[in-house]
Image: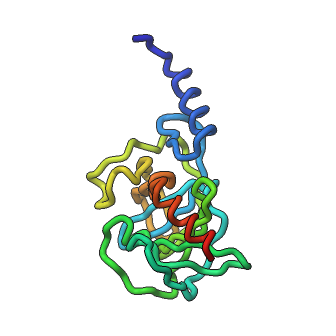
């Protein structure tokens, strides 16, 4: 097996991260911008490249024959956007909608989807050196949905917190994405 010098390994990891935004840049000097949000007491984050916009909760129209975690659809400036409840997707306990509840509109491949979260905190820039591989010990969310974790000094009023980095490409399977696209085509 060929050993790659540490400096070159970091460059290779950075190139992979540029080619595929779902790849964590753990251990590199490459910085990453993330949108930090909360579900329950845990902080989660998505790469900002995936986020189109963040909106307040609004009326969701239910649709038949969708997975339980798909709440329905909304009309966002003439576009039908499927809405998923991340708590249900991750098997977390339900929570009441509050004034802080938001929908994060993201692009997963060709599919625009809204994700319901408890609260959006802020956009942060974190160094790749702060990103660690995913670990099941820090969250009750299935490790398949994770890209890694990062310790951040301050998120809003919260200090020295662990942020769980989500792998957006894994939140919906290809089959689920195809089913949602098919439903949108029927609208």
Q: Which residue appears at 57% of the width and 57% of the height?
A: 108
Q: Which residue appears at 45% of the width and 69% of the height?
A: 38
> Which corner quadrant of the image does residue 162 belong to?
bottom left
In the rendered image, the vertical position of residue 107 relative to residue 67, given as above or below: above
* Residue at far right of view: 77
The image position of residue 176, as x and y in percent, is: 46, 60
Of 100 and 125, which appears nearest the observer? 100
* Residue at far top of view: 2
Of 57 and 159, which appears nearest the observer? 57
Residue 166 makes an appearance in the image: no
Q: Which residue appears at 60% of the width and 44% of the height?
A: 31
How does the figure colour the protein chain or chains? rainbow
Mark count:
0
In the rendered image, the vertical position of residue 131 relative to residue 64, given as above or below: above
Quarter that holds the N terminus: top left
* Residue at far left of view: 137
Q: Is residue 79 left or right of residue 113?
A: right
The image position of residue 35, as x and y in percent, is: 56, 61
> Which corner quadrant of the image does residue 69 belong to?
bottom left
Q: Is residue 170 left or right of residue 140?
A: right
Residue 84 makes an appearance in the image: yes
Q: Is residue 43 left or right of residue 180?
A: left
Quarter that holds the C terminus: bottom right
Q: Which residue appears at 29% of the width and 61% of the height?
A: 140
The image position of residue 22, as x and y in percent, is: 53, 46
């Amino acid at each position: 097996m060929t050993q790659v010098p540490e400096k070159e390994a970091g460059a290779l990891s950075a190139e992979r991260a540029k080619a595929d935004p779902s790849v964590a840049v753990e251990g590199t000097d490459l910085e990453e911008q993330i949108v930090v949000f909360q579900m329950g007491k845990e902080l989660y984050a998505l790469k900002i490249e995936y986020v189109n916009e963040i909106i307040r909760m609004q009326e969701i129209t239910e649709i038949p024959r969708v997975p339980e975690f798909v709440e329905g659809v909304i009309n966002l400036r003439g576009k039908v956007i499927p809405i998923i409840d991340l708590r249900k997707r991750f098997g977390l306990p339900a929570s009441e909608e509050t004034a802080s509840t938001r929908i994060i509109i993201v692009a997963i491949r060709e599919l625009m989807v809204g994700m319901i979260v408890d609260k959006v905190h802020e956009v942060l820039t974190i160094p790749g050196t702060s990103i660690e591989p995913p670990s099941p010990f820090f969250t009750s969310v299935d490790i398949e949905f994770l890209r890694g974790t990062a310790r951040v000094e301050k998120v809003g009023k919260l200090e020295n917190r662990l942020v769980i980095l989500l792998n957006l490409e894994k939140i919906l399977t290809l089959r689920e994405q195809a089913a949602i696209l098919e439903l949108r085509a029927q609208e």
